[in-house]
Amino acid sequence: MGLMIVVILLIVGVLFAIKFVVLKKPPETRQSFSRTQMASNLGLALMASTTENCRGTAVKDLLIDCAEWPEAGGTITCGDGRKSCEYVSSTIELILADTLDIWNQKYYLTAGTEKTLEGKIVYLHHDDCPASKTLPGESESFFLPTNRGLLTLKIFICV
């Protein structure tokens, strides 16, 4: 009888340990770090990416060209006839659709030399995460020098 009580107490103790230790939600710090790393890694990957249909031009070079000549749509003409502004925007949109959209991550991405949202050369966002609202999340910014000032690429991952 006494042995049975000890076994039952051990089982109850193990169940409590499982509930509070193993099934514990990850702390917000870890989730915040994961969002920051996701934004950082995505930005670094975009900056290092080259294009297939635009003579292997780097995405960062297309962004710089677009920022320097926004009124002309850029000076680089890609193989399909699109200028750098249109091509880089659709390329980044495709990359985001194949990554963050599939992973069900809410985000927005802006690129430009202007501080206002209207002056951005690229603005892409998930429906629930527009740049026009102040939302909780983590961001990472990347900077590229241009003839028209500093181009800022900002990637924001919403909570």
Image (cartoon, rainbow, N blue to C red):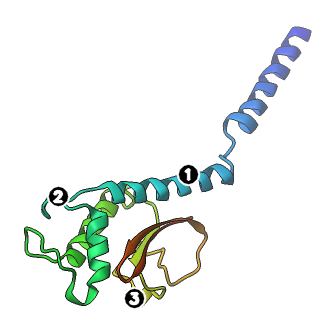
Give the residue at x 81% y 26%.
13
The percent position of residue 148, horizontal first and vertical second, equals 37, 83
Question: Which residue is identified by label 2?
Answer: 56
Q: What amino acid is labelled 3 in the image?
A: Gly
Q: Residue furthest front?
A: 147
Task: Quote the CA–CA distance across marks 2 and 1.
Answer: 31 Å
Task: Quote the CA–CA distance across marks 3 and 2.
Answer: 27 Å
Please state which of the two labelled residues, at mark 2 or mark 1, is closer to the viewer.
2
Please identify the quarter of the rendering in which residue 48 is found.
bottom left
Q: What amino acid is labelled 1 in the image?
A: Ser
The percent position of residue 11, horizontal first and vertical second, equals 77, 22
In the rendered image, the vertical position of residue 132 relative to residue 9, given as above or below: below
The percent position of residue 123, horizontal first and vertical second, equals 37, 78
Give the residue at x 35% y 80%.
147
The percent position of residue 138, horizontal first and vertical second, equals 57, 64
Please identify the quarter of the rendering in which residue 98 is found.
bottom left
| Mark 2 residue element | loop
Please state which of the two labelled residues, at mark 3 or mark 1, is closer to the viewer.
3
Q: Which mark is residue 119?
A: 3
The residue carrying pointer 3 sits among few (fewer than 14), some (14 to 19) or many (20 or more) residues within 10 Å by Cα, namely some
Task: Quote the CA–CA distance across marks 3 and 1.
Answer: 30 Å
User: For this view, does 88 lie left or right of residue 123?
Assistant: left
Q: Which mark is residue 34?
A: 1
